[in-house]
Amino acid sequence: MGATMATSIYILIIFVVLGTWLVGYFRLKVMQIIEKIQQKIFVEFSIAFAEKLPKVNLSSTRKYYLPELVNRFFDTQNLQKGISKILLEIPAAIIQIVFGIVLLSFTIHGSCLLELWLFFVS
């Protein structure tokens, strides 16, 4: 009697393990997509930089500090980091907000499930 577990606990454990696995899988897929986007950004900036650098007219650029202009290429890394942050953090925050609101609605009032269903269906 003391060592038996209810079926609902087994189902809950299965759902938690499956949910954790799915979250990890989808996070991995999102990271792969972000990596591809970062590679494309780097390639586009590299090609643009390689095309523009030989065409620079040195006599017309005397009023600019050339090392500073050349170092702008390295800003692509900052751009890549910013985009990866946006693409990873904003969807996660939105999902957390939505599930938090749903959870709060269940704890405040039990009939909110019907209201949420009607809201999303209509």
Image (cartoon, grey):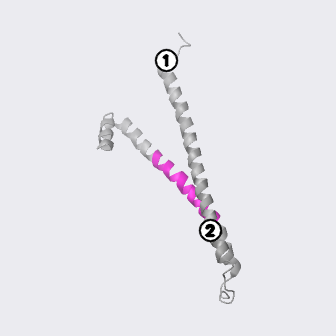
Using the image, tell me which numbered label, if any, was put on residue 45: 2
- Nearer the observer, 34 or 118: 34
Q: Is residue 17 left or right of residue 67?
A: left
Per the image, is 27 magenta?
A: no
| Residue 112 x/y as whole percent | 32, 37
Kind of residue indicated by mark 2: Phe
Q: Is residue 43 left or right of residue 108?
A: right
Please tell me in which quadrant of the rendered image residue 122 appears. Answer: top left
Write the start and end of the magenta stretch as one range. Answer: 75-95
Q: How many marks?
A: 2
How many residues crowd around disc 1 within 10 Å: few (fewer than 14), some, or many (20 or more)?
A: few
**72, above or below 58, in the image:** above
**100, above or below 51, in the image:** above
Q: Is residue 108 left or right of residue 15?
A: left
Taking the view exactly as shown, the residue that stands out farthest to the top is 1
- The residue at which mark 1 appears reads as 6
| Residue 20 x/y as whole percent | 55, 36
